[in-house]
Image: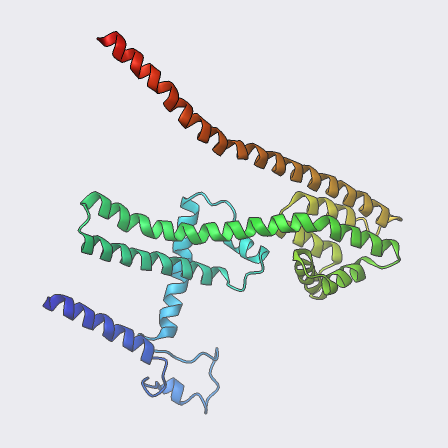
Amino acid sequence: MIRELYGLFALCFLGFTLVFSDFRWFQRIGLAERLKGYTPMQGGRSSTGILSVGSFREVIVPLSHAIGERLSSALRVSEELSVRLERIHSPIGVAGYRVRQVGWAAASFGLAVIVSVLVSLPVIIAVAAIFGTPILAFLVLEQRSISASKHWQQRLRMELPVVTEQIAMLLSAGWSLGSSLERISRRGTGICAADLKRVMIRIRQGLSEVEALREWAKKADIDPLYKLVSVLSLNSEAANLGKLISEEARAMHKETQRELIEAIERRCQQVWIPVTAATLVPGVMLMGVPFIDALTLFSM
């Protein structure tokens, strides 16, 4: 009991030290910090103590990033996290997301240890729970980012034919490619409009229209967008680009219709699974009654 109290006191002391280290009245100001107002300092960074939130963050961020990348590669996750987060316009960076994953894994590890001690689980089950729960927590967040990325790609694939028709209409009306993209990005509210806003930002940063569109296609990573960008790259060569884009929009509509029909047929087939299970179990039970009766008759 005394050891547990000492450990709890040490943890509380460490936590209070980390929290209070951000307050100026608690810190011991160093000589460089005191002379900062009189001497030009290089880098502009204020010195922090060893036990401070800033120093703790400088240690935990790269460590969490390294651990997350190792676990992700060990679990055969092919696509990089930075690509997924950039695709869905996530406000959280890769380092922040990895810190969140490691934090969830550490919290689940501590919870599994407490539950195993309190419930007195068998050794094998306790070891499996203690080491399996952090991995499961890590995988939950990893799967969440993968699902969000796939959902974004699906919505982009559904919106792309309509946006392609709008681009073709504007080009046929005499608008340039850049002004057409700018108009759609300003007036649209969907996934394509959000991506086109980023395309326009990249164009203002110095990229050409074709380079910005190819960068968008590489981040989105869907086949219809690759085809559309290949047609839009002929902007300076083709005379009637609006007609080509209209044909590409019709092809996208046909492909979307085919995928929708496949999804409907798949769901129609899935309907029969519970129906088959509901009829199969009573049928087996009814067939089993005379079979057992016959076995009983022949065994007498």
Q: Is residue 103 left or right of 215 when viewed as pictured?
A: left
Colour scheme of the picture: rainbow
Q: Is residue 5 above or below residue 169?
A: below
Instruction: Give x and y (percent) for residue 99.
Output: 41, 61
**Do we see residue 281 in this rendering?**
yes
Q: Is residue 300 left or right of 241 when viewed as pictured?
A: left
Quadrant location of the N terminus? bottom left
Q: Is residue 10 left or right of 277 when viewed as pictured?
A: left
Instruction: Give x and y (percent) for residue 237.
Output: 85, 49
Which residue sits at x=45%, y=43%?
A: 76
Q: Is residue 81 above or below residue 179?
A: above
Residue 20: quadrant of the picture: bottom left
Which residue sits at x=23%, y=9%?
A: 299
Q: Residue furthest bottom?
A: 38
Residue 213: quadrant of the picture: bottom right
User: Observer-nearest residue: 213 or 42?
Assistant: 213
Quadrant location of the C terminus? top left
Instruction: Give x and y (percent) for residue 242.
Output: 85, 50
Q: Is residue 134 left or right of 163 when viewed as pictured?
A: left
